[in-house]
Amino acid sequence: MDPLFLNRMKEILQNDYDKFIESLNQPSKKAFYLNNKKENVIKHLDSQYIQQHPLVDEAYYFDYHHYPLGKSPFYMCGLYYIQEPSALLVASQLDIQEDDYILDMCGAPGGKTCAIASKLSNKGLMISNDINTLRAKILSENVERFALENTIVTNCDPLLFTNELNGFFDKIILDAPCSGEGMFRKQNKAVETWSLNKVKECSLIQKKLIKAAYDLLVPGGEIIYSTCTYSKEENEDIIQYALDSFDLSLIDIPKSHGMSEGINMKEVVRLYPHRYIGEGHFIAKLKKGNDGSIHKARLLKSNIKKDNKKTVEQFYKETLNISCPQYLLDNNNHIYAILPQFPKLEKIRVLRNGLYLGECKKNRFIPSLALALTLQKKDVKRSYTFKKDDDEVKKYINGQTLEGYKEKGYGVIFVEDYPLSFYKESNHQIKNLFPKGLRR
């Protein structure tokens, strides 16, 4: 590690420095939280390998060496999200109301987005953004896996939102790009790319982002600011800049279980790996003053072509026991179910506008994985149910065709009580519709 970084940490930690260095040689920890939209998940998990997180409801540490949850079909079904334990703490600090409008400015890979959006009703709204195209696609995939219908995924410079949605959001998550010092135990690249210049460059970006976050908030709205770094320039100094520059006040975050106060700023949280079970992190919570105006955005309108609407409605009638969504968006024959409060985003690249239902192709409808993951057994006319360890589940995830014994048409494969994917049956063959990019 760079001697300059080590000297800076010695100055911050003083007598705790040796314990901190020792902790960097220890294995990192993994955690997960349950999908709030799925019922009775915990009964399907092996209690001997998981441990309740002391601070976050429905979150757990787990032994990934003996219990690789990321390889389970339950992961594919969206029952939980695997997240670094310190990052997991961030979303829990927001007091979410089910009808809140929330922006995750730098949302990839989606851990905070999914945790919060799954607690919103369909009267609420989550817009989750990432400036990096590849990361934004991963974000979109995780939103899909969590079966989120109230979420828009975008791919743009987050500063662009100020051109359209100032005074619009009740809450904003700003997990700011940073120098990554807190991830040194996990990522060699973070160690290799660290420099004091990088710290200074990141602090300039962070100041622009926190100003944008302030502008985007409604009066009385809240920002949760976080980084995975230790540098005061990217943490307390950014918060002090925000307090000095804007009508913002700090909300105290209670400390326990190894959470430390900030440097000359007791309201914020610092997480160090020798004190808290997780990587290095910083969290602050800010509230905007009550002055200012609330912005009402132009709304996204349903625009589906008549023929395509008929095709989608026919699919619902033949395959499902639920009504076709009322508001449908047609994007080059790709059909989305949108919600009436969705804003029309004029100059922002949108990757996912609500729930992707599927594609209309030559007067037939090809349903999506996203739609399948929202369904329950009572919602579908045809289905097959397998246990988690059944060979049929392994074969299906591998992309193989299964033998069937039901009538032809579309149906859903369930693992226990949870949807995995659509299938299409004909001649007693279950055609595999699990996406090729997810097969293994």
Image (spheres, grey):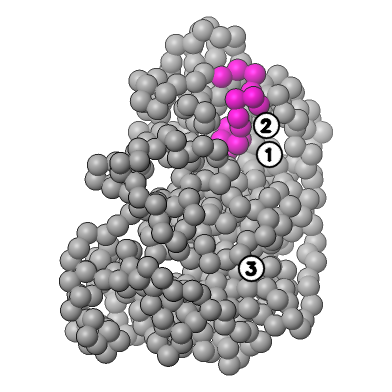
Residue range of the region highlighted in magenta in the rendering:
370-383
Q: Position of residue 217 (x, y in %)?
A: 68, 74
Q: Which mark is residue 51?
A: none
**What is the distance, in whole Å, between disc 1 and disc 3 at their CAs?**
29 Å
Residues 168 and 158: in front is: 168
User: Considering depth in this image, is 11 or 137 the residue closer to the camera?
Assistant: 11
**Quarter residue 355 falls in:** top right
Dot 1 falls on a residue whose secondary structure is strand
**Mark 1 vs mark 3: which is more N-terminal?**
3
Disc 1 marks which amino acid? Answer: Ile
Dot 2 or dot 3: first in sequence order is: 3
Q: Quadrant of residue 358?
A: top right
Describe the element under mark 2 as helix, strand or loop: strand
**Numbered mark located on residue 360 in the image:** 2
Q: Residue at x 67, y 60 (%)?
A: 97
Query: Does 373 appear in magenta?
Result: yes
Q: In the figure, 309 relative to 268: above or below?
A: above
Q: Position of residue 341 (x, y in %)?
A: 76, 55
What residue is disc 1 on? 335
* Vertical side of 309 occupied by 284: above or below: below
The x and y percentages for residue 60 are 40, 51
User: What amino acid does circle 2 point to?
Assistant: Cys
